[in-house]
Image (spheres, grey):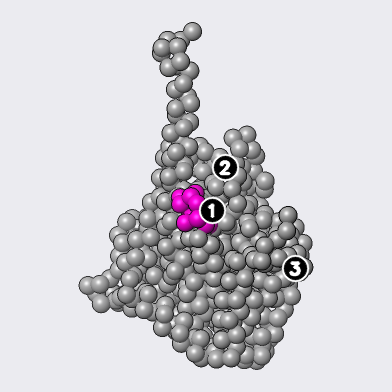
Amino acid sequence: MAKSATQRTIAGVTLDRVFILSLLFVAAFGAWGLIDPEGMSGASLGFTTFMLTGVGWYWLLICTGFLILAGYMAFGPYGHIKLGADDEEPEFSTTSWIAMLFAGGMGAGLIFWGVAEPLYHFRAPPGMAGETAEAARRAFALTNLHWGLHAWATYGICALVIAYFTFRKGARPMISTPIEWLFPGNTGRRIGGVANVLGVVAVVFGLAGSLTMGTLQIRAGLGELVGTPINLGMSLLIMGIMYATYMTSAAVGVDRGIKLLSNINMIVAILLLLFITLFGPTAFIFETFIDAIGTYLTQLPALAFRLLPFEGEQDWTASWTLTYLIWWLAWGPFVGIFIARISRGRTIREFCAGVILAPTLFSIFWFAALGGAGIYIELVGAGGIAELVFQDVTRALFVFLDYFPLGQVLGFVALFLIFIFLVTSADSGGFVLSMMTSSGSLNPALAYKLIWGTLVAVLTVATLFSGSVDVAKAMAVTGAVPFSVVLLLQVVGFLREIRGERCTATAHRAEPESSDGGHAA
C-alpha cells in the first residue's frame, strides 16, 4: 500500500505527523539554545518558576494521587491481573529487570544528590534551625519524600497504563493509546496525536536537563581528581564522549546494550555503597537507615499534602519538593514506556512491588549511607562539606569521598558510575523516543535512535552553555507542565478499561451457575 503524504519512508524512518512535529519543535528549541543560550535559559527558568509558585497544589495532588492509586492497584482487586496473557512468563529475570528500571529511572540523580541533598536540608531545613538532631531527621524525611514512593509511584502508574494496553490488550505502546480508547473515533486520534507530541517533548527536555547535570558533575569530578579545566570546552568534550558511547550502545539493542550497562551499573553502585557503609561510620549509617524509614513513613501522610503556606516557605517548596515532583512527571513518559517494555508477563502486584517498593528501599539506604556519613563528618569530623554544597553542589561527592580510604580511587569509580548511568539513561531515552515516533514499534529502526540521540545531545549542549544546575533543572521539568494533563487522561482511560475487564470476568465466572437455574449438576 502506498504511503500518504505524511507517511513517507526515508532511510528506514517513517515521516508521520508525530515524528515531523516533534522533530521540528525540538530542533527549533535546540537551535534557540545554541544561538541565544541566555534567552533560552531565562525563558525556561521564568516559565517553570511561574508554574511552580502559581499552581503548586496541582503538582502535589497529582503525584500523591498516583501514590494512592498505585497502592490500590497493588493491594486491590486488580493485583492478580497479568501484563500480558494469563500464561505468559516474564521476558527478563527479576534481577536484570530491577537493574534496568532503576538505572533508567534515577541512577545518575542518586549519585549527584546522594551526599548533597541530605546535607543541604540538614544545614538549612525549612521552618526550623539547621544543624540539629531534628534538622537531621527532617533532612532525611524530605530527601526520601523527593526520591521515594512519590517518584516511583509516578513512574509506576505511567508504566502500568502503557504495559496494560500494550501487552494485555494488544494495542500500540504509545502515549495516545489509552486516550484513543477513552475517546473513540477522530476525536481520540486528534487528542492522541497532540499527546504523543507532548510526550516526546517531555522526554527530550527531561533527558537534556539530566544529561546536563551529569556532565557538570563529571567535569567537577575530573577537576578534583586530575586537575582538568572546569570550563565549557571540557563540558563539550565529556558530552561528545558520552554521545559516542550511548549511540554505540543504542546500535546493539535492549537485550545487549541497555541490559549489559544496567547490570554493570547496579554491581558498581552496590560495591560503592558497601564500601562506604563498611569503611565509614557503619553503626551510625544503619541507625540512620532505620530512623529514616520510621521518620519517613510516619511523616509521609502530612508531607504528601504539605506546601508550607503559613511558614512563608513557598519558594523553598517550589525549588525542591515541587521541582522534583514535576521532574518525575517529565520523566514519566520515558521511564514509563521503557519500564512497560521490559515488564511483560508480570502481575500488577508483582509489578508494583518491583517498580515502587524495591527502588524506594534502595534509595532510602543509599541516602542513609552517603548522606548519613556526610552528616556524621559534619557532627563529629572536620566538617566543611555542607558549606561546599551551597558553593558548588557538583563537587560535594568527590570531596566527601576523600574522607575514605582510597578516596581518589573511589572518585574514579564514582565518575565511571555517573558516566554509565547517564549513558544508560540516554540510550533508554533514545529507544523510547524512537518507539514513540515510529507508531509504537517495540524494535524501532536504528535511524530513529540516531536522530533522537543527536537531537538530545544538541539540546544538552545548548543547556550546557548556561553552566547552571538551576537551568538544567528548569529544562528537565519544562516539558512536564503540559504533559500532566495527558497523564490524567491516560489514567482515566486505564481505570475505565480495567474495570470493564473485571466486570466481564466476573460475569463469565457467574455464567455456569446461572445457566441451569443456579443448581449444580
Q: Looking at the rendered structure, which numbered label has been put on residue 177?
A: 1
Relative to 9, say whether 205 is above or below: below
User: Mark 1 and mark 2 in contact (Cβ < 8 Å)?
Assistant: no
Task: Give whichever of discs 2 and 1 has the lower sequence position.
Answer: 2
Q: Which residues are magenta?
A: 176-189
In the image, residue 179 lies in the stretch drawn in magenta = yes
Residue type (three-letter) at the residue carrying disc 3: Ile
Name the amino acid type tagged 1: Thr
Q: Which residue is pictured at 41% across the width and 13% down the height?
A: 518
Say which of marks 2 and 1 sits in front. Answer: 1
Left or right: where 161 falls relative to 448 = left
Mark positioned earlier in the residue sequence (2 or 3)? 3
| Circles 1, 3 touching at the beta carbon (< 8 Å) | no
Question: SS class of the residue under badge 1?
Answer: helix
How far across and down, in percent of the image, does residue 484 sit?
A: 43, 64
Q: Earlier in the sequence, mark 1 or mark 3?
A: 3
Which circle, 1 or 3, is nearer the viewer?
A: 3
Q: Secondary structure at mark 2?
A: helix
Nearer to the camera, 167 or 231: 167
Q: Tags 2 and 3 in contact by the CB under 8 Å rule?
A: no
Mark 2 vs mark 3: give the one in front.
3
Q: What secondary structure is the magenta-colored segment mainly?
A: helix
Residue 395 image label: none
The residue where tag 3 is placed is: 10
The residue identified by callout 2 is 168
